[in-house]
Image (spheres, rainbow, N blue to C red):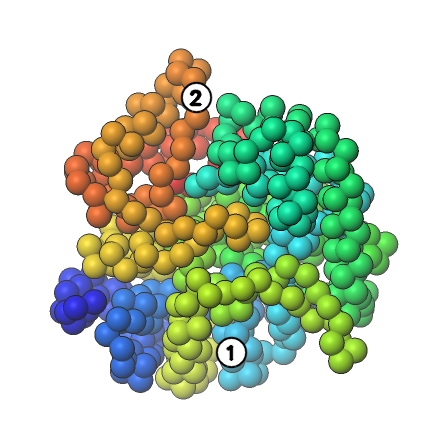
Amino acid sequence: MNCDYKHANYKKIAYYEKILEKSPDANYLDPAQKTIQLLKSDPQKDPLLYTISLITAPILLAYTTWVLFDALRQGIRRLYFLTRDSFVVYRMALVLCKAWHIDIECRYFYCGRYILRLPLYLFDRDYVLSHLFSISNIHTTSIMVLLRAGIKYEDAVNILSQTNWPIHEPLDSSNIDNFRSDILNNPHFDHYASEAAQRAETQVRSYFLQECSDTASIPFALVDIGWYGSTKEAFCKIYHKVFNKQYIPKIYYLGSFVDDNSQFGSHSGWLFSPGKNFYRGLFISICLLECLCMADHGMTIGYKMKDELCVPVFSLVEDYAHASFQQCIYETYTRNFVELNPVLKKELSFNCDAYKLIKSLMISPSKVEAQFFCNLKFSDDITGYGLTSLAKPIFLNDYLKQSIGRRILQKLGIKRGCVKTLSLWMDGSIVLSNHFFLMNLDIKLLRYIQILIDIIKKSFLPISRRPI
C-alpha cells in the first residue's frame, strides 16, 4: 500500500469498529485496537492486520467460546481440531481454557481431505473415486485428478500418455465421464493408486493409534471450520477401520452447507447450517475465509516416525507467506482479549454481529480491500495443486458466459454446457473490474434467486451446492 491504509479505508474500518463497540457481552474493540497498535510496523501488511484484528479474530474467538461451552454441556472431555483451517481455533481454545479454567483437553489433529481419503481406496473404492473425479471450484485438469490419488507425478504423466490425454487438459462436465472411463480402464492406474493407498494406510493407522487409542473411555468431539462434512466422514471411516469400533463423534462447524448424516453423526454450524440461517452461506466466500484461517504450516501429506513419535509431513508453504503473520495477529488478539475479558462463564452472543462483519468484507469489499486480498494465493484442490490468485479482474464477455441468465437456462435444461467459475472470490473480482454495476446486480439477483429456491426445496432436499 502506497498510502496509509486506515485513511484509505476509513469508512469500512469505522463500520467494523462500530459493530465491535456495541457488543454487550464482551469487549471486542479494545483487544483489536491494542493488537493493531502492538503489531503495526509494516504498512504493506496493514490490510491483513486490520482485517484480522477487527473481523476474523473476533468471529473465530466467539465461535471458539461456543464450541467450548457447548462441549462442556455435552460432557465432552476432548476436542480434536481437524485440518489446517482449524489451527487458529485450536490455538485460541488453548488460551481460553487456561484463562477461564475450562476443563477440556484440546488436541490439534494433523490431517486433511487428501491424506484421509488415500487409505479409503483400499476398502471404499467407489467413495474415493467419486471424489477423485469431481470438478474443483475454479478449474480441474487431468494431472490433478491422478495426483489426488497419491500417484507420483512422473507415473501420472505416463498413465495420461498411455490414454492419450494431455497432462493439463481442462476437465468439466462435458468430458469428465470420458476421462474417468479411460483412466479406470488403464491397469496402471489401479496399481499406482493401490500402492499409494497402502503407504498412506500404514502411516494414517500409526497416527490414529497414537492420537486416539485411549478414546474408548474419553467422550470426544471434532472441530472444523466447515463446509461439506467430507473430512469428518473420512475420519469416521478410518476410525472404524483402525479400532473396529463404530464411534460417531459430534462435530462443530463455523458453517455447514449440508444436513446431518445419521451414518456419521450430528453436527452443529455456528454461523449457518441448512436448518439455521442457511442463506448466510451465499454471502460468504469460503475460499477467502480459508485464506484468513489457514495455519502457518503446510498441508499434511503424510506421516513419519521421528523419535518414537508419528509426526506429520507437510507440503511446501512458500506461496502462503501471509500465514505466519496472520497467526501472530490471532495469538496477540486472543491474549489481549482474555486480559481485557478476564471472566466469562458462557459463550458469546456475537453470531449476528459476526455475520454483519464478514458479509461486509466478503460481498461489499472496498477497493483497497479487494486489491490486497485478491493477490493472496490459494488452491481449492485437496492436493494444493493449481495454486492461483484468489481473484482478478473479469472481462464483461467472460462474465456473461456465466451470468444469471445463462445459469437459469442451464438449470432448466434449455442451454447445454457448463458454467466455469471465473474467480475464487467473485465479489472481489467484480470490484476490480469494469462494468461493476452490471456484474454486481447480476450476482446479487442470482443469490436471492438461490435463496428463494432453497426456501422452496429445504423441506424436501438437503442443501448440497457450493456457494458463489
Q: In the visual, does 161 lie left or right of 319?
A: right
Position of the C terminus by quadrant: top left
Residue that numbered label 1 is attached to: 96
Q: Position of residue 15 (x, y in %)?
A: 21, 63
Q: Residues within 10 Å of mark 1 (few under 14, many from 20)?
A: many
Give the secondary structure at mark 2: loop
Q: Is residue 267 above or below residue 463?
A: below
Q: Nearer the viewer, mark 2 or mark 1?
A: 2
Q: Quadrant of residue 366?
A: bottom left
Write down the quadrant of residue 401 in the picture.
Answer: top left
Residue 196 rendering spot, x and y as whole percentages: 74, 50
Q: Nearer the viewer, residue 50 or 174?
A: 174
The residue that label 2 is drawn on is: 417
Q: Residue at x 75, y 65 (%)?
A: 207
Query: Which amino acid type is shown beneath numbered disc 1?
Result: Leu
Q: Amino acid at mark 2?
A: Gly
Is residue 281 visible to us here?
yes
**Image location of residue 421, percent across then percent down:** 39, 37
Q: Of label 2 and label 1, which has the lower sequence position?
A: 1
Quarter holding residue 161: top right
Q: Residue at x 70, y 65 (%)?
A: 303
